[in-house]
Amino acid sequence: MGSLSNGNTYAACVTPEERVGELRRLFGKAQDDPLRVVGVGAGAWGSVFVAMLQDAYETIPNLVQVRIWRRPGKELDRPSAQHLFDVINAREDVLRRLIRNCAYLKYVEARLGDRVLFADEILRDGFCINMLDTPLCPLKVVTNLQEAVWDADIVINGLPSTETRRVFEEIGRYWRERRTMPIVISLAKGVEAALLPVPHVVTPTQMIQQAAKIPAINVLYLGGPNIAAEVYNKEYANARICGSEKWTKPLAKFLRHHHFVVWDNCDLVTHEMMGGLKNVYAIGAGMVAALTNESATSKAVYFAHCVSEMIYITHLLAEEPERLAGPLLADTYVTLLKGRNAWYGQKIGSGELKPDMGVNIKGKGMIQGVSAVEAFHELLRQPSLSVTHPDGIRTVAPVELCPILIILYRILIKRL
């Protein structure tokens, strides 16, 4: 179980300067050298996370500098531009800000079809293409990856797990000449299946270590429970920063706000694996909700069974897993209740979407649970992991004891 990092200390550390002080000392920062924080990837949670840091430390740019990288060239389609225009005009504070910054006219032109807007362009004004209904603060956006990361002290991985390895291989090339490596905080939820030398999962933090050639102590994981739009709207939320104690405690203090409580925890593997599993079973939760007309009883039965499978898989694949309680259970609950993977499952269950339509959904981003279904199924069907069947007579591959995972695999991957 984690601890609420420095709860009493935080009560006294009310200023941004005090919250960042310990972290700056660990990095050996000179007085005129800002702590450089860079988000990599600008999906909903990645953008919100960076925006919260920008909001928290914008008054001390000499001590903390916050930026975000996203790929250039992604166009906003006409219906989305029209919807964004309506969002802007419904929020007087946002409208006034855009007018004051001479940025409103381009949204009028896009609404009329006279101009094309791009995702990196609107992000500078505080709009995430995957979350248009929740305006953020304006962000400092960089579209050149090397420029964004080469001198970063802290990198926030907001990429989907399916893109993490490839992007961090490129980042690793830019870091080869560095004398000291940055800290990476991964927000990604998902896994890869590796079969050699023995079957095992590869989590996003492990992908980052392998791809960027960065020490394990420098890579951490941050998990929920949280829903991006709700967190930015200052609804009470908490999170866990998992990894080396050298970094988790000062980072928890740095990331914590009055409405966003951050716990520190040393069990990175269990928390990250559960982060991948919850997205798998959230898709199933959405299907159950759609197929039973939101039956509370049916959803409760599904919750009981899926939690049992998640615990079984975690205990099978992690050496000393933490028990599913507290924040871990809450993270699972909120993901099954609400989020893009549960939404995707509902659309599949109602027939509004088909598995062959792809997993990169307009306005939602990447549905990471689908690739995790395939990875966990591939891993758990390996004969070398065989376990004794409950009948005590035969041995079976572990996947045979995970009926929900089997059904999700047949629907989403085999498309039967």
Image: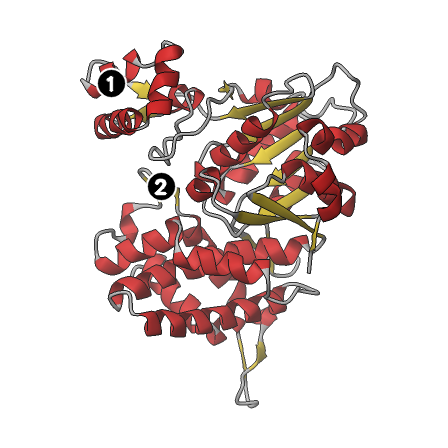
Residue 264 visible within the image: yes
Residue 182's place in the image compared with 199, above or below, is: above
Quarter-wise, where is residue 39 in the image? top right
Quarter-wise, where is residue 35 in the image? top right
User: Dot 2 corresponds to which residue?
Assistant: 364
Numbered label tally:
2
Rendering coords of residue 41 (x, y %): 50, 32
Q: Residue at x 37, y 63 (%)?
A: 285
Q: Amino acid at mark 1?
A: Ala
Q: Residue furthest left?
A: 112
User: Dot 1 corresponds to which residue?
Assistant: 110
Packing grade of label 2 (10 A; few <14, some 14-19, many >=20) is: some
Secondary element at image label 1: helix
Residue 345's place in the image compared with 108, above or below, is: below
Rendering coords of residue 151 (x, y %): 67, 21
Packing grade of label 1 (10 A; few <14, some 14-19, many >=20) is: many
Q: Is residue 367 left or right of residue 23?
A: left
**Nearest the eye: 93 or 216:** 93
Residue 218 visible within the image: no
Rendering coords of residue 326 (x, y %): 59, 62
Q: Is residue 197 left or right of residue 396?
A: right
Q: Amino acid at mark 2?
A: Lys
Q: Residue at x 21, y 30 (%)?
A: 79
Q: Residue at x 71, y 30 (%)?
A: 20
Q: Residue at x 52, y 89 (%)?
A: 391
The CA span between labels 1 and 2 is 21 Å
